[in-house]
Amino acid sequence: NHDVGHLDFGLTGCLEWVVIMDEVIDQIRRLQRGIPVNPETMAVPVIAEGGRRGQFLTHPHSLRHVRSVQWRPKLMNRQGYDRWAAAGAPTLVDKAAARVRQILESHRPRPIEAAQARAIADLVQNFGA
């Protein structure tokens, strides 16, 4: 995922853009997994039953399987205009900035081992020598 968050040919970086692109990449990865097609997921009897009732979306079979194939964004709005407006009409950048703040406030990186720290320090000290 090289260049995520880079702008202006890599001369500028944007943490909000990093989290936005993380969501886009997550959606692409979900699409690449595809949707399994087999007798269980095709659910022909459920569809036939729903045809007589007019719908099958609330059928227990549909409810059991919907989460396994549905992608749910964390930043992008899928709530509809009224709920979005009632929540203060946050833009995608607003939500990304809030996510960046949350990450910066809560993330605790795992410490590196002493040997790795020495190797990095040696590289930095000898850079350009």
Image (cartoon, rainbow, N blue to C red):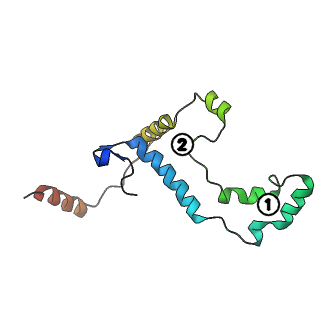
- Write the residue at 66% across / 59% down: 69
- Work out whether mark 1 precedes mark 2 in sequence or the reverse, and give the earlier one: 1
Say above or below: 99 vs 47. Answer: above
Say above or below: 75 vs 25. Answer: above
| Crowding near the residue tagged with mark 2, few <14, some 14–19, many ≥20 C-alpha atoms within 10 Å | some
Q: Amino acid at mark 1?
A: His
Task: Judge left or right: residue 39 versus residue 105.
Answer: right
Task: Judge left or right: residue 90 versus residue 63.
Answer: left
Please identify the residue farthest to the right as the structure is shown: 52
The alpha-carbon separation of the residues under discs 1 and 2 comes to 29 Å
Query: Which residue position holds label 2?
Result: 75
Task: Judge left or right: residue 78 versus residue 48.
Answer: left
Please identify the residue farthest to the bottom as the structure is shown: 39
Q: Are marks 1 and 2 in contact (CB under 8 Å)?
A: no
Query: Which residue position holds label 1?
Result: 61
- Quarter the C terminus occupies: bottom left
Return the x and y of residue 8 as percentages of the image width and height.
31, 44
Return the x and y of residue 106 as percentages of the image width and height.
43, 43
Pick the front one: 123 or 74 = 74
- Mark number for residue 90? none
Indicate the secondary structure of the residue bearing disc 1.
Answer: helix
Q: Amino acid at mark 2?
A: Leu
Say above or below: 91 vs 13. Answer: above
Indicate the secondary structure of the residue bearing disc 2.
Answer: loop
Return the x and y of residue 9 as percentages of the image width and height.
30, 48
Q: Quadrant of residue 12?
A: top left
| Crowding near the residue tagged with mark 1, few <14, some 14–19, many ≥20 C-alpha atoms within 10 Å | some
Task: Judge left or right: residue 63 versus residue 119.
Answer: right
